[in-house]
Structures are given as structure tokens and as C-alpha cells.
Image (cartoon, rainbow, N blue to C red):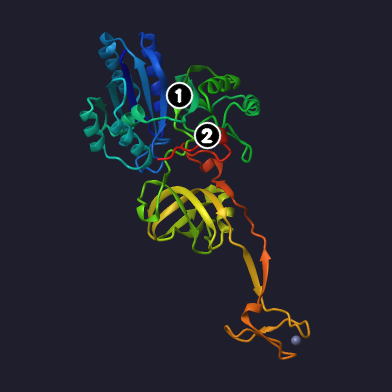
């Protein structure tokens, strides 16, 4: 049976709704009509460094086995549901819905999907692609969501993570979420999920702070564990429905290895290089340093919300070898990398230089002038410049990978401790 792939994006506003909820409602409706899941529905996070994004920049896709005679009915149901649920009255809420029937998604379309996660793509490009491959497109209020809807359908997920989500009944939207904190701590102890709780700030990470329909979302390395983990959490309010998505969250998929000369605004880069300036800290607590990749130099900014990452940045010294990961922004001083992770690969030795002791009287000599060596004032002994006393001072940081505070982390960014998810996607 051919698979009908349904992509939906941009149904939410800063004030409410959530595209994952629209996906869950669609899933429930279509399964009750007799459709079957060909594969798990997907929650795809798009480029977090995109100036048009709403909140988390999430698009969803459903992949269904649909009897041929039911396809038109499914299309009608989906379009009607999206039309009913999307947030009206917001210029920047521009829903897009895409349908595609076929066993495989064309390679060109998959490449488009990677671009939507990593850079800025135009609505024109999206519509051209949809037309070329015979996808059906529905647009509301401008329809920029077609970009994300296309991406959600096609993005290859070679190493996905999973999120099980519970949604609230409509009467509770906008009210305080009633969740049993002890059950969340119990979940943390099971190790079934990740990004559940921030021990540093004691913040529960599975509940959003927006008035959206999400009650809680639990992330895990497998769909089974995500569902099991959500089952451990106790709520003191009614749940409307639950579902589980395969996602590209916590995969680092948005980062692309780049030379400094290749950097473009609104992309997310991984740059290997050498520290080329002493770090400076502004009054607001932001740390800036220069990085050189052997040919070019770029400004790296480690902003206050990244928390402890600033301590690492401010302890860097010229010559240290690093890999930085972050969002590329156009700033008055030129392209700047807003650093989200730093891998310290090699640290230079830190020496303090002093004039040597006099071999005759044991007192400290003095500089005899620039590149003139040293002289003892008492005995008149002269020593060459090479006699300088070098004392090694321990560095304040060690090689390793350092990340921004949990509260500043992007959905797409892989937490440093998350080794069990395997290697990072490279492309
Ligand atoms: Zn002396």
C-alpha cells in the first residue's frame, strides 16, 4: 500500500497552540477513520537561528497507510482540522500543509529538508520543489509553513530521539500545570529519559511555560522508553491525549562544519581553530574572543545566558586549540558566532616570565633593556635573554567539551552527557 505522508507546520503563535498538538489530534482522527501508521509520526525542529521562527520552530509529519479510496477524505479531514486549530490573528502564524503519496521521498527533497534545519530557505524554493515532485500543498495566511511541512515529511532520521507528549484538555489551557514533582524526580532516577530535570536550577524540564496545549513532553533514546517514562509522571489534571514522536531533537543536526570564510548569517556552524586574542568580558558579563582557523579570524561571543560556558571562555589564552559550535549572526563588528558549545582540544602552557637569579649573589637580576639580557646591579654579572626564568602556571580549564547552561540550550542541540545516543550526524 502506498504511504500517504502529511506534513504540517506553523500553526502556533507566541500566545498559544502547538503544531505537535495539531499532529496528535490528526493522528487520533485518521487512525479512527481506519488509516494505519506506516511509521512513527515525526516532530522536526527547524533551524533555531531563523528570524521567522515562532517558538520552538517545530513541524510535524504523519506517515500513514491509507486505502486509495480514502485518500481524498483524509486530505479533507487534515485541511479542515488545521484550519480549525491554527492560531488566528497573527501575521507570523502562516500554516502550511503538504501531502505526498509514494513509497520513497526523492533525494532532492531530503536535501531540501536538511537545508531547512541548517539555513534559511525561501517559500519560493519550497513551492517549486513541491510542484516538481507532485506534492499537494495547502496554505493559510501566507503559508510559509509549507517549508517546514515539506521538511518534516522528508528529513532523514538516521539517529533519532523520541518524545512522548501528554496534552491538556482545552479548559485547562493557559492555567498552571499540575504535575507531581516527586514523580518527576522518580523518573530522573530511572534513567529512562533525558533533559527531564535541571539539578542546578531545580527546574522541571518536561513542562513548557507557554499557554500551549502541551502538559508535558518526555524525551528518550527509544520510543518505548519515552512512553514508559511519561507513564511514570503523575499529573493532577486531566489528559486529553498522548502520543509519541520520532524527533531530530538533541542530535546536533543543525550544526555544519565550516571554515570561517564559508560562514553565513542564520546558519549554525562548527569551527575548528586557535584562540587569537585574550578574552574580554563586558559589563553585562558577555565574553568575547577571536578564533583563527589558519586563514581567517572571527569573533566568538559567549553571552551571559550561557552560564558556566563564560567561565571556560574567559579562561582561554591565545594559542589554545578549540572547536566551537554556535549560531552565526551578522553584528556591527561583522559575522559573529554566538557560542553554544566549546570543545577544548589543546591548551597552551601558561608561563610567567621573570628575570633570573644572579649566580653570584643569589639576588634577582634586572632587565638590561629590551633584548639586552639581564644584569646584577650588585656584582655586575650579565646574563643573556635566554636565561629568563619561566614558571609554569596551572591553567584554569582542562581539555573537554563544555556546553551552555541547560536553560539556554536549543532543542536541536545534543547535551554533552548524552553519549548513549551515538555519533553526531555529519554531512
Ligand atoms: Zn649578583
Q: Residues within 10 Å of mark 1 (few under 14, many from 20)?
A: many
The image quarter in which residue 377 lies: bottom right
Q: As rendered, which of 304 and 365 lies closer to the eye? A: 365
Q: Report the residue at 53% width, 48% height from top.
A: 306
Can you say which quadrant of the picture contains the C terminus?
Answer: top left
Q: Is residue 16 visible?
A: no
SS for dot 2: loop
Which numbered disc, 2 or 1, marks the residue that appears first in the sequence?
A: 1
Q: Residues within 10 Å of mark 2 (few under 14, many from 20)?
A: few
Judged left or right of residue 362, residue 198 is left
Residue 329 locus on image (x, y percent): 39, 51
Looking at the picture, how far across and down is residue 58, in whole percent?
A: 40, 32
Q: Quick check: 11 above or below 416?
A: above
Q: Which mark is residue 245?
A: 1
Q: Is residue 168 left or right of residue 367?
A: left
Whole-percent x, y for residue 323 in the image: 50, 51
User: Which residue lies at the image location 28% right of the left edge and 17% below the top edge?
Assistant: 75
Q: Between label 2 and label 1, give the one nearer the viewer.
A: 2
Q: Which residue is mark 2?
A: 422
Amino acid at each position: 500500500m502506498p504511504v500517504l505522508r502529511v506534513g504540517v507546520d506553523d500553526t502556533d503563535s507566541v500566545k498559544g497552540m502547538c503544531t505537535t498538538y495539531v499532529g496528535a489530534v490528526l493522528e487520533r482522527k485518521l487512525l479512527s477513520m481506519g488509516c494505519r501508521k506506516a511509521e512513527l509520526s515525526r516532530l522536526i525542529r527547524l533551524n533555531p537561528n531563523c528570524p521567522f521562527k515562532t517558538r520552538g520552530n517545530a513541524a510535524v509529519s504523519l506517515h500513514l497507510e491509507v486505502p486509495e479510496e480514502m485518500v481524498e477524505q483524509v486530505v479533507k479531514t487534515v485541511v479542515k482540522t488545521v484550519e480549525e486549530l491554527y492560531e488566528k490573528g497573527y501575521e507570523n502564524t502562516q500554516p502550511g500543509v503538504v501531502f505526498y503519496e509514494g513509497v520513497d521521498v526523492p533525494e532532492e527533497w531530503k536535501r531540501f529538508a536538511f537545508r531547512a534545519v541548517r539555513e534559511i530557505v525561501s517559500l519560493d524554493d519550497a513551492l517549486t520543489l513541491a510542484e516538481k515532485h507532485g506534492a499537494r500543498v495547502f496554505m493559510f495566511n501566507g503559508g510559509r509553513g509549507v517549508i517546514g511541512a515539506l521538511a518534516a515529511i522528508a528529513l532523514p532520521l538516521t539517529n533519532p530521539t523520541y518524545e512522548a507528549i501528554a496534552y491538556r484538555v482545552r479548559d485547562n489551557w493557559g492555567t498552571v500545570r499540575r504535575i507531581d514533582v516527586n514523580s518527576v524526580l522518580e523518573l530522573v532516577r530511572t534513567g529512562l529519559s533525558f533533559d527531564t530535570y535541571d539539578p542546578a536550577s531545580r527546574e522541571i524540564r518536561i513542562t513548557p511555560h507557554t499557554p500551549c496545549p502541551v502538559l508535558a513532553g518526555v524525551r528518550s533514546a527509544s520510543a518505548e522508553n519515552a512512553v514508559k517514562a511519561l507513564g511514570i509522571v503523575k499529573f493532577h489534571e486531566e489528559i486529553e491525549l498522548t502520543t509519541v514522536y520520532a524527533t531530530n531533537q538533541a542530535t546536533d543536526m543543525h550544526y555544519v562544519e565550516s571554515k570561517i570564510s564559508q560562514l553565513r548569517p542564520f546558519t549554525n556552524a562548527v569551527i575548528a581553530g586557535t584562540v587569537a586574542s585574550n578574552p574580554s568580558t563586558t559589563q553585562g558579563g558577555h565574553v568575547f574572543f577571536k578564533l583563527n582557523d589558519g586563514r581567517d579570524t572571527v569573533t566568538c561571543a559567549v553571552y551571559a545566558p550561557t552560564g558556566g560556558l563564560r567561565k571556560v571562555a574567559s579562561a582561554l589564552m591565545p594559542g589554545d586549540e578549540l572547536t566551537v559550535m554556535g549560531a552565526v549572526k551578522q553584528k556591527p563588528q561583522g559575522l559573529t558566532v554566538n557560542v553554544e558549545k566549546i570543545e577544548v582540544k589543546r591548551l597552551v602552557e601558561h608561563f610567567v616570565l621573570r628575570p633570573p637569579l644572579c649566580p653570584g649573589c643569589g639576588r634577582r637580576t634586572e632587565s638590561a633593556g629590551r633584548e639586552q639580557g639581564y644584569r646584577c646591579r650588585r656584582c655586575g654579572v650579565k646574563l643573556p635573554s635566554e636565561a629568563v626564568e619561566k614558571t609554569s602556571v596551572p591553567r584554569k580549564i582542562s581539555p573537554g567539551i563544555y556546553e551552555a547552561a541547560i536553560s539556554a540550550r536549543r532543542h536541536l542541540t545534543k547535551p554533552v552527557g548524552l553519549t548513549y545516543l551515538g555519533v553526531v550526524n555529519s554531512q
